[in-house]
């Protein structure tokens, strides 16, 4: 079976980076595809207990694909829910911290 930690780091990198570069005003087609990508995770993610936690979490917290600000925050909050469950530190979900980590890098 896949290493859940390596898989997790790679998946979060993909998801947060894709959210960081998602348009501020996505087209209906971009929104529909982002929604499909996110909704496929509880079905396809190759860590079944992770997938099932995510499925429950998404029932209470439907994805926000309205634009990069909403999407980045929504993902950050879902990641924080996992962090909390694993006893890890929470990440600041403000757009400044998210962009610094996943888009622009540190300013100096
Ligand atoms: P990660 O949590 O992988 O984070 C990588 C980097 O992202 C961090 O170094 C930090 O810079 C940044 N970061 C941290 N938090 C946030 C945030 N909230 N928003 C934005 N950036 C952030 N593991 C399990 O053991 N059980 C599970 O049920 C489980 N469910 C998962 C569900 C999903 C959908 C995914 C993608 C992963 C899941 N994982 C689960 C894996 C887990 O989240 C971690 O990826 C893994 O434990 C490795 O952790 P890490 O400390 O290296 O950093």
Image (tube, grey):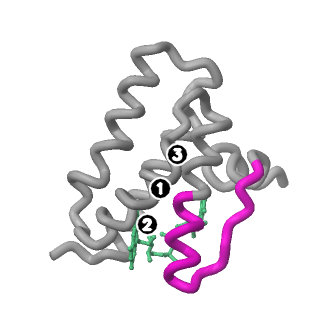
Residue situated furthest front in the rendering: 60
Callout 3 crowding tier (Cα within 10 Å): few <14, some 14–19, many ≥20: some
Q: Residues within 10 Å of mark 1 (few under 14, many from 20)?
A: some
From the Cβ of disc 3, is ligand 1 less than 8 Å away? no
Name, please, the residue furthest toward the bottom: 87
Is label 2's Cβ within 8 Å of ligand 1? Answer: yes
Question: Quarter-wise, where is residue 101 in the image?
Answer: bottom right
Look at the image and say whether residue 12 sits in the magenta stretch.
no
Q: Are circles 2 and 1 on residues that touch, CB within 8 Å?
A: yes
Query: Residue tagged by mark 2?
Result: 9
Using the image, tell me which numbered label, if any, was put on residue 13: 1
Give the residue drawn at x 60%, y 55%: 76
Give the residues in magenta.
78-94
* Residue 97 in picture, x, y percent from top left: 75, 54
At x 36%, y 27%, the residue is 33
Q: Secondary structure at mark 2?
A: helix
* Left or right of residue 73: residue 79: left
Pick the quarter of the image with the N terminus: bottom left
Q: Quadrant of the C terminus?
A: bottom right
Q: Which residue is mark 3?
A: 17
């Amino acid at each position: 079976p896949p290493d859940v930690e390596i898989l997790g780091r790679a998946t979060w990198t993909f998801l947060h980076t894709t959210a960081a570069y998602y348009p501020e005003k996505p087209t209906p087609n971009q929104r529909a595809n982002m929604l499909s990508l996110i909704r496929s995770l509880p079905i396809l993610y190759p860590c079944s207990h992770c997938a099932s936690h995510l499925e429950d979490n998404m029932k209470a917290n439907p994805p926000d694909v309205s634009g990069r600000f909403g999407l980045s925050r929504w993902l950050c909050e879902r990641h924080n829910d996992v962090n909390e469950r694993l006893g890890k530190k929470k990440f600041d979900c403000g757009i400044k911290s998210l962009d610094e980590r996943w888009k622009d890098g540190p300013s100096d």
